[in-house]
């Protein structure tokens, strides 16, 4: 059998691999799904050639935490507080999601992410109350064609806070039926409630379940008031910190807790845009760097915020630079900015892959790694002349510039068009599902005034802390 070869030519190549660096007018050769060579004047027989003149070629983005199921109800909460979000979504609309809604939400959100250049995503799936919801969530994710980590987070019965209900053991069945190999494009993790959201006995029981599964762990730690209860210190005291744990947010953790994460080899996922919007505390980018942890980035909640990595990168750099400037006696007069555009681009790619334990296969353009590659147009009015590729991407990039996307050497988008999914059909089904969800919401007291259009502001029902 002859090899399948793709040659991308004449691009500005940002490899995110310090050993390879940034190349101008360069080519990337892909063979049987893997990157085999990056350089100038590459030639290959029998290959599919993509002329990327005037474009940037780089690794696909990595989103290390998003609740994909919520894609059907995107933006309804753009003017909500965190409390209104908990009432409107977690005590409200979430209960009406049927398995097919969860599946469609995952498909819609995953396709949106791919279209915008995110090739790897951790789905923090916490609306799976039945085994059927779990299967449907996995199917939806798999149907996107992206590289994904399915993080099993249970459903509403587990999220009455602080929860006294142990994590569903159906997670073991899901692992056995869907994730039998680590070599798959889709792998699995455990979405832990942790000491912020469950009573201690349940946190211990959940930790035992993780040992049975043997997966990596992702846990919300340090979001708003909850984070001030020293959740990381509690995990540390109870032997639950290690290099397979990703701590999401970290906004309201104490300084010594950051050091505990660093000492354990754990990773951090910052969702700067959502943290700013929901009042979870200042994004922890700078505090993570202070203890030597390079954070990864995440979209988190598209009920309120946008779902692409350009948006997230800009929020991350803008907020951290404002914090750094404010900390100076003469704001804005430092000799040098602390956080560079290159840093933020690394957070969004290679540091994300490291956070998910996938940096051996993705996150950079490195010969031998899988070809998760995006081609971003740089000849538009907002990008050209291309005087600083990383600066242009971070400050002027947007999903409309993403011309081509490859996952494991397979085109999922080319010439600006999604190839393997019927986008119009997904959107039509999403509209129908959304309509049904809002009809159902009218029958519940807490969401009796639910409507689309932007005017619905849920009343805040007291949430147990
Ligand atoms: Zn989250």
Image (tube, grey):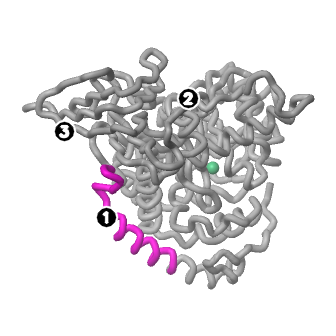
Q: Where is residue 357 in the image (x, y as percent from the top left)?
A: 48, 29
From where the camera sits, is residue 297 visible? yes
Residue contact at pointers 3 and 1, CB within 8 angstroms: no
Mark 3 packing: few (<14 Cα in 10 Å), some, or many (20+)?
few
| Image spot of residue 150 (x, y percent) | 46, 46
Within 8 Å of ligand 1, the CB of disc 3?
no
Q: How crowded is mark 1: few (under 14 residues within 10 Å), some or many (20 or more)?
A: few
User: Which quarter of the rendered picture does the C terminus lie within?
Assistant: bottom right
Q: Out of 309 and 460, give the one closest to the viewer.
A: 309
Counting every numbered tag in the picture gives 3
Reading the chain from its start, which is encountered first: label 1 or label 2? 2
Tell me: 146 left or right of 109: left
User: In the displayed structure, would residue 168 be above or below residue 180?
Assistant: below
Front-most of residues 260 and 236: 260
Q: Disc 3 to disc 1, how far (Cα)?
A: 24 Å
Looking at the image, tell me whether mark 3 or mark 1 is earlier in sequence order.
3
- Examine the rendering and report whether any part of residue 149 can be seen: no
What whole-number distance in Å separates the C-alpha atoms at marks 3 and 2?
Answer: 39 Å
Q: Badge 1 is on which residue?
A: 422
Asked if the stretch drawn in magenta spans residue 426, the answer is yes
- Of badges 1 and 2, nearer the viewer stands 1
Pick whichever, 253 or 28, lies toward us: 28
The residue that mark 3 highlights is 48
Q: Which residue in the protein does label 2 denote?
A: 244
Of mark 3 and mark 2, the one earlier in the sequence is: 3
């Amino acid at each position: 059998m002859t090899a399948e070869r793709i040659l991308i030519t004449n691009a500005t190549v940002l490899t995110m691999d310090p050993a390879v660096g940034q190349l101008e007018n360069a080519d990337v050769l892909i063979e049987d799904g893997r990157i085999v060579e990056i350089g100038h004047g590459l030639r290959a027989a029998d290959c599919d050639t993509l002329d990327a003149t005037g474009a940037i070629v780089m690794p696909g983005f990595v989103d290390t935490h998003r609740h994909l199921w919520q894609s059907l109800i995107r933006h309804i909460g753009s003017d909500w507080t965190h409390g209104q979000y908990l009432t409107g979504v977690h005590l409200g609309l979430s209960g009406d999601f049927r398995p097919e809604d969860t599946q469609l939400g995952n498909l819609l959100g995953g396709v949106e992410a791919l279209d915008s250049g995110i090739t790897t995503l951790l789905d923090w799936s916490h609306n799976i109350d039945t085994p059927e919801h779990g299967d449907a969530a996995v199917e939806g994710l798999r149907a996107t064609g992206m590289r994904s980590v399915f993080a099993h987070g249970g459903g509403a019965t587990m999220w009455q806070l602080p929860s006294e209900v142990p994590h569903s053991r159906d997670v073991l069945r899901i692992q056995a039926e869907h994730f039998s190999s680590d070599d798959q494009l889709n792998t699995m993790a455990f979405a832990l409630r942790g000491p912020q959201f469950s009573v201690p006995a349940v946190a211990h029981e959940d930790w035992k379940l993780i040992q049975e599964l043997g997966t990596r762990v992702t846990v919300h730690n340090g979001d708003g008031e909850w984070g001030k209860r020293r959740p990381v210190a509690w995990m540390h005291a109870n032997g639950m910190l290690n290099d397979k744990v990703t701590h999401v947010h970290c906004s309201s953790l104490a300084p010594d807790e950051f050091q505990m994460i660093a000492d354990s080899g754990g990773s951090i996922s910052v969702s700067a845009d959502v943290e700013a919007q929901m009042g979870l505390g200042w994004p922890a980018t700078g505090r993570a760097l202070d203890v030597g942890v390079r954070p990864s980035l995440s979209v988190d909640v598209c009920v309120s915020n946008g779902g692409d990595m350009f948006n997230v990168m800009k929020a991350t750099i803008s907020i951290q630079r404002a914090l750094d400037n404010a900390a100076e006696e003469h704001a804005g007069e430092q000799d040098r900015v602390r956080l560079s555009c290159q840093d933020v681009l690394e957070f969004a790619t290679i540091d994300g892959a490291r956070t998910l334990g996938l940096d051996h296969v993705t996150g950079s353009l490195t010969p031998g790694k899988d070809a998760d590659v995006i081609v971003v147009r740089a000849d538009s009015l907002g990008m050209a002349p291309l005087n600083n590729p990383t600066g242009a991407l971070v400050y002027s990039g947007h999903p409309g510039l993403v011309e081509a996307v490859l996952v494991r050497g397979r085109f999922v988008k080319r010439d600006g068009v999604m190839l393997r999914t019927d986008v119009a059909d997904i959107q039509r089904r999403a509209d129908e599902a959304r309509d049904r969800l809002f009809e159902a919401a009218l029958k519940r007291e807490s969401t009796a005034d639910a409507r689309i259009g932007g005017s619905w502001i849920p009343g805040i029902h007291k949430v147990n802390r």
